[in-house]
Amino acid sequence: MDNPSAARPPVPSRLGDYSVRPRILLIGALALAVGAVAALVADALLKLIGLITNLVFYQRLATALVAPGAGHHPWWLIVGAPVLGGLVVGFMARYGSEAIRGHGMPEAIEAILRNGSKVRPRIAQLKPVSAGVTIGTGGPFGAEGPIIQTGGAVGSVLGQILNVTTTERKILLACGAGAGMAAILGTPIAAILFVVELLLFEFRARSFIPVAIASGIGGIMHFVLIEGRPLFAVTTVVGFGPYFGLGGLPLIALLGALCGVVGSFLTKLLYRLEDVFRKAPVNELLIPVLGGALVGGIGFFDPSVLGTGYTLIQSVLNTQYAANLAVGAGFFLLALLALKALAWTVALSTGSSGGTLAPLFMMGGAFGALVGLVFQAGFPSLGLTASACAIVGMVAVFAAASRATLASIVFGAEVTGIYTVGNVSALVPLAVGCVVADAVALYLIGDETVMTGKLTRKGIRVKQEYEANLLEMVPVSEVMSPKPRALPATMPAAELRGLMEDIERPEYHMRSFPVVDRAGKVVAVVTRNDLVRERDCLEGKTVLDIGTKDPTVVHPDESVYAALQRMVWRHVGHLPVVDDDGRPAGYLSRGDIHAAWRRKLSEEGVREGRLHIRRPARDATSNGPDRPRS
C-alpha cells in the first residue's frame, strides 16, 4: 500500500474492545496480588504513623493511631515537631527523590500520562516513610494520598518486572492505588470510582474488572487488619427532612453550592501559596522546614489541626448540636475550618508529604455542620440535622476540589456506614450536594483541581470527562466509497500506468486499486506509489507483482474506529472493504473517516430549527371545502 512496512505489526482484532479475552484472567490474578500487597503496605503505613506520633508526642512505644493534639504537650513540642518532620522530608527529597513531595495523586497521574506508567522502585520505599514522618510529627494530612502513590508504585514495579503492555502496567498501577485507598478508608466501591475518574482515563472491562478485584481485596483487609467498621462510622441521628427523608433537598442543594465555593477557594489558595513559596528566597531544602514552622505555629493555637484528624472528623459527624450551645459550636467549627485550611495549604504548598482527602473531609465536615446549625435555627421544623449537613459538606467539598464527583457520592455512604435515611437511599442527598458543588467549582475554577492543578502548570493536560468514541458507533458501510474498480491479478502493470496517466479516465483520480484473483477475491492492493517506485522496470510485470500482497482489509459491519486503527498500524491511507467471501464491497479512505467524524461533531455543534408539524393530506373521499369539485 502507500508505505508498506517490512515488519508488519499485528492488526487489532475485529472484535475490538467489546470482547473479554483470556488475558484478563492473568491481569485479574496479578490484580489480586497487587491488592493484597498494597493493603499490607497501607496497614504498615498507618502503624508507622502511629509509631512516630506516639514516640514524638507521647514518648511511648506503640503503633495505635492517635491524635497528636489529644494530650497536654509543651508548646515547644507542638511547634518543633512539624519543623523536625519538615527537615527530614527535605533531606529525603533532596537526596532521595523529589517525587515524594506532595500528596501523591499528581505524581501517579503524571506517571501514567508521561512515563508509560513506570514508577521507580525507590518511590515505593521513600513515599510511605516520608508520609509517616510528616504526619507522625504533626503534619495536617491523611494517609490516603501517600498510599495511592505507594500502592500505585507496587503495581507499576510488578508491571515493569513482567512482560506486559503499557496499558496493562497502567491497570496494575491503578489496582495498587485503588486497593491502598480501599484499605485505608474501607471504601472499595468509592475507591473503584475514584480510580476510574482520576487514573484510568477509560471505563472498559479490561481495566474495571482488575481494579474491582484489587479494591475489593483492599476493602476486605481494611476490616480484617485495620478496623472492623467504617472509618467515620456515624451513630447519631441523621435527618434530611420530611417526605421520606428528602424534604431538605432544596437546602442540601444550597449547601452544595456553598461547598463548591469553599472547594474552589481552597484549590486557589493552595496553588497561590505554592507560587509564593516557590519564589521565596529560601533554600529548597529548607522550604519544608519553613512550612513545618508555620504549621507548628498554627498548632500552638489549636493542636487539633495536627495529624490525620480521623478522630476529629468522626466527632464532628457524630456530635448532636444542641440549640442552646449552637453559638459556641459555631465558633468552634469556624475556627477549625479556618485553621485546618491554613495549616493544610501551607504544609502542602511547601512540599510536605501527605494526603488531601482527610483534610478536605475535615474542612468540609466542619463547614457542613456550621451551615447545618444555621439551617436548624432558621428551619427548626424541617428536621434537617447538622450531622446530615456535615456528611454532605464533607464529600461535597471534596467533590468540588477533586472533581471526582461519583466517587465522592459513594464515599459519603461507605465511609460513614449511612446507606439509607428514612425510606430512601442516602445517596440521593449526597448526590445533590456533590453534583451542585461540582457544577459551581467547574464554573469558578474550570479544569483546575487539587488533583491536577500541579500537572496543568507543567503543561500536562488531564481530561476528567469521559465520552464514547464517536467513530466506534459508525459502521464502515455508512461512510465507505462505492465499490471501486477491481483489477485482475494478470493485468500488466504498464497498462495500469497508461490508464492512470490519462486525465480523461476515472483511474486518473484514484490512488489505489484492489487486485482480485479469478474467484473475485481481493489478494493484493496496488497504489500510485507502487507504479512510481517500479517505473523503470514495469515491463513483464503484472499489478500483482508490484502490489502489496495479503493486504489489510476491513469489513462493512466493522466500526470506522477499527478501520482507523488498521490504517495507523499499517501506515496507509486507504483500505479495501470486503464482504465475508473476501470480494470487494467498497473502499475506505482518510477522507471518508474525516466525513464521518465531521458528521458526528455536527450533532454537538449544529443547532437545528424548531419542530414543524405538517398537516396530513386530506382523504381523497373527503367532502371538505378543500376538495376540488367536478
Image (cartoon, rainbow, N blue to C red):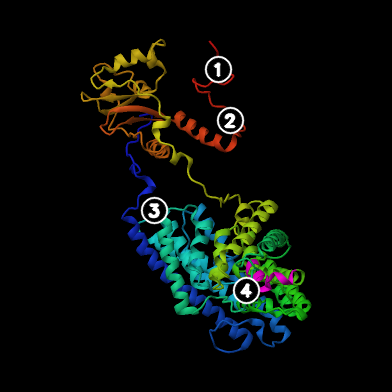
Q: Main secondary structure of the magenta part?
A: helix
Residue nearest the viewer, comparing 509 with 560: 560
Q: Is residue 56 left or right of residue 173?
A: right
Q: Which residue is mark 4?
A: 238
Distance from Cα at disc 2 to Cα at disc 4: 52 Å
Instruction: Find residue 615 and report its horizontal and vertical position in percent.
Output: 57, 27
Q: Is residue 166 left or right of residue 113?
A: left
Please tell me whether mark 3 or mark 1 is closer to you in this view: 1
Q: Give the quarter of the image for residue 280.
A: bottom right
Q: Earlier in the sequence, mark 4 or mark 3?
A: 3
Q: Which residue is mark 3?
A: 165
Q: Which residue is mark 1?
A: 627
Q: What span is colored magenta in the figure?
A: 379-392
Q: Is residue 122 left or right of residue 586?
A: right
Q: Is residue 62 above or below residue 224?
A: below
Q: Amino acid at mark 2?
A: Ile
Distance from Cα at disc 2 to Cα at disc 3: 56 Å
Question: Is residue 286 visible in the rendered structure shown here?
Answer: no
Q: Residue at x 56, y 77 (%)?
A: 233
Distance from Cα at disc 1 to Cα at disc 4: 71 Å
